[in-house]
Amino acid sequence: MFELEQELTARDVFELWNAERPAALPAVRIPSVLPKDRVKQIAARLEEYPHREDWIGAIRSLANWEFGLGEKGWRANFDWLISNKGRRAFEGAFLAPPPEEGPAFLPVDQRPLFVKKEEDGQDG
């Protein structure tokens, strides 16, 4: 049996930001009554990205974005994420690059061979 995913609410999105954001980014205060402009922006993003995993992935990916973490004096924040510009995080713009291939990733037939020399038992 499978569980249906609960529909995210605007309040859920506020809470996800605070729970998943990189430590270098500011938390957002969650007011008892959510501002209408923020709710409207969140609703627009939820239409495009309705799943909790979408939001968690987008928020966590910001840890890979040096500029957004304050490299040039500006930091991404909650309002940036829910704006149209924040779509970039959902689209994977800040996903970590795959690790560079090194010798461990070479096909077996291309890896260097390390042969242990056997001692022949003769004194020099």
Image: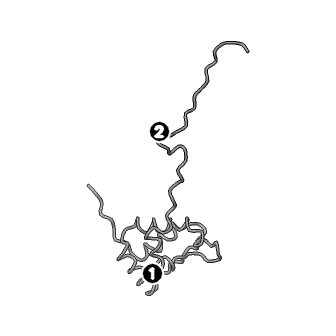
Q: Which residue is mark 2?
A: 108
Extreme residue in the top direction:
122
On screen, residue 115 versus residue 55, left or right, reads right
Report the residue at 44% width, 70% height from top.
90
Image vertical order of residue 60 relative to residue 37, above or below: above
Placement of the C terminus among the 4 image quadrants: top right
Residue 67 position, x and y percent, is: 59, 72
The residue mark sitting in front, 2 or 1, is 2
Q: Secondary structure at mark 2?
A: helix
Residue 5 position, x and y percent, is: 33, 65
Q: Secondary structure at mark 1?
A: helix
> Which residue is nearer to you in this view: 100 or 46?
100
Extreme residue in the left direction:
1
> Which residue is nearer to you in this view: 67 or 108?
108
Few, some or many residues within 10 Å of mark 2 (<14, 14–19, 20+)? few
What colour scheme was applied to this rendering of the protein?
one colour
Placement of the N terminus among the 4 image quadrants: bottom left
Looking at the rendered structure, the kind of residue marked 2 is Val
Report the residue at 41% width, 67% height from top.
54
On screen, residue 4 versus residue 29, left or right, reads left
Q: Which residue is mark 1?
A: 84
Few, some or many residues within 10 Å of mark 1 (<14, 14–19, 20+)? few
Which image quarter: residue 24? bottom right
Report the residue at 46% width, 73% height from top.
88
Q: How many marks?
A: 2
